[in-house]
Structure formats: structure tokens, C-alpha cells
Amino acid sequence: MLYSTRVKLKNRGPNPALLTIVCGPLMKSNDFFTDRLLVDLSIMAELLPYVDVTEFQFLFALLCIVFNPLFWNLVARWEYRTHSLTSLFGSPYTACYSLGTVLLFLAIFRSHCFTEAMKTQPRLDALETPGVYYLGLMMIGVGAILVVSSFLALGFVGTYLGDYFGILMEKKVTGFPFSVMENPMYWEALLTYLGLALMSSSPAGLILTAVVALTYKVAILFEGPFTENIYRKKEESEKRK
């Protein structure tokens, strides 16, 4: 068995209401981040008693989840205003690829910490059904499609903050998956983490996924207007020529 402890949720067996609360927002809303974020307060209240929030691996995973979007937003804005990384590496493309490599490593490390945190926490009997397992597997599969298609549409530079290095796209990407949703990369991460949590029957994983959703919600509030401003300045500059 992968995890050290298994707990029952009041001996009720599979809990359809639990799955509705966890997965409902994915099925009901086109605006995932501004509707219910992924998990509402009732599921948080139900799961918290089965999570050791003081355990080191859990806290470290929590730190990684919060750190990543904070890091890339601060560094990208610093580069946009100062061009320090471009000056250091001698080229905006080299600087962007270097930062992108760091961000890729941080994403992999965050996923590793997420997985390790679940290993030290109890499993939940209410989630240990074949249906839940395969639902989680399906979410990971959909997430993989989103990340691959997004990367192919944007390229490495477009994916890893090329806009902040002055490497702007000629026009807005409107093909799949951007034709059906905003921020597909964030959707991918959420679906992957939710899928892993469901496959592992992990209350800690569900709570960490909710934190991922919350941090992405905050990140979007800052990233969206800032990126729009970058392209607005580009249009104004082109009109003056």
C-alpha cells in the first residue's frame, strides 16, 4: 500500500455528494476560476479532519504551490521593467529560455512535492472506488491533451512569458484549446492534481489542489491586465509609426 493510513468517512462508503462538490465546478462552469475555484467550503470542512496540516511534507508542498506563481510573476515583471535578464544573457530569447527552464524545473519539483505529501497522509475509503480512480485517470488524460496542445499553439517562448521579454506574438492565439477556454495551462495543472488526488483517494491531495486553484485565481487577477497592457502598448506604438 502506498500510503501509511486509511480512514473511513463515518463508515458511509462511497459519497456521491463528496464527488459532486469536488468535481461539480469542472462540469458546470465555463469560468472555473471565478465560479467556485474547484472545492467549496463544505468539502474543505469535511476533509480537514483527515489531514495532518502540521506534517512537514504537506507544509512544504503548500509552500511550493504558493511560491511558483509568485516567483514567475515577480521575476517576469522585474524583467519587463528592467530588462535585467536580457542584459545578463545578451538576448531576450536566451533569457526567456533560461527562465522557462527554471520554471519547468519548479513545476516538476512542485508535482513531486505534491505526490510526496499525499504519501504521508491518510487515504479516504469514500474515494476508493473504481469509478473515482478512472475519473482521476481521465482528468490526467485531459490535462495532458491541454498541455500538449497549448504548448504547440504557443511555443516555448509563448508558454514561458515571452511577452515580458518583449517577444510578442503577432496575433492572439485562437485555436484549440484557446478556442474553448481561457488559461488552458492552468486547467491542465488543476486537472492533473485533482486526478492524482482522486486516484490516490487522498484528502490532502484534494485540499492541496484547492490551494492550487486559489493561487491560480490570484495569479490570473494580476497576469491578465498586465499582459493586456503589454499588447495595448504594442498597438499604440504601431499606430504612431
Image (cartoon, rainbow, N blue to C red):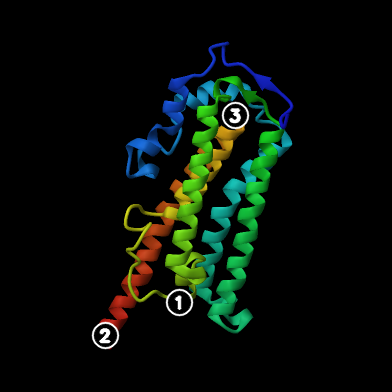
- Residue drawn 62% across and 80% down? 89
Q: Split into 4 quadrants, where in the image is the N terminus?
A: top right
The label number, if any, that marks residue 240 in the structure image? 2
Which is nearer the N-term, disc 3 or disc 1?
1
Calculate the distance from the C-alpha at mark 1 to the C-alpha at mark 2: 20 Å
Kindly state the secondary structure of the residue where label 2 is placed. helix
Disc 2 marks a residue whose amino acid type is: Arg
The label number, if any, that marks residue 157 in the structure image? none
Question: Residue 236, image x and y in percent?
Answer: 28, 78
Question: Residue 153, image x and y in percent?
Answer: 42, 66
Question: Residue 58, image x and y in percent?
Answer: 67, 37
Q: Point out the frontmost of discs 1 and 2.
A: 1
| Residue 215 visible to an observer of this rendering | no
Disc 2: CA contacts within 10 A as few (<14), some (14-19) or many (>=20): few
Disc 3: CA contacts within 10 A as few (<14), some (14-19) or many (>=20): many
Calculate the distance from the C-alpha at mark 3 to the C-alpha at mark 1: 43 Å
Q: From this viewpoint, which residue is outermost toward the left?
A: 239
Question: Residue 175, image x and y in percent?
Answer: 34, 63
Kindly state the secondary structure of the residue where label 3 is placed. loop
Residue at label 1? Answer: 167
Q: Split into 4 quadrants, where in the image is the C terminus?
A: bottom left
Which is nearer the N-term, disc 1 or disc 2?
1
Q: Point out the frontmost of discs 2 and 3.
A: 3
Q: Nearer the viewer, residue 2 or 217?
A: 2
| Left or right: 27 as drawn, with respect to 188 | left
Residue at label 3? Answer: 201
Disc 3 marks a residue whose amino acid type is: Ser
Kindly state the secondary structure of the residue where label 1 is placed. loop
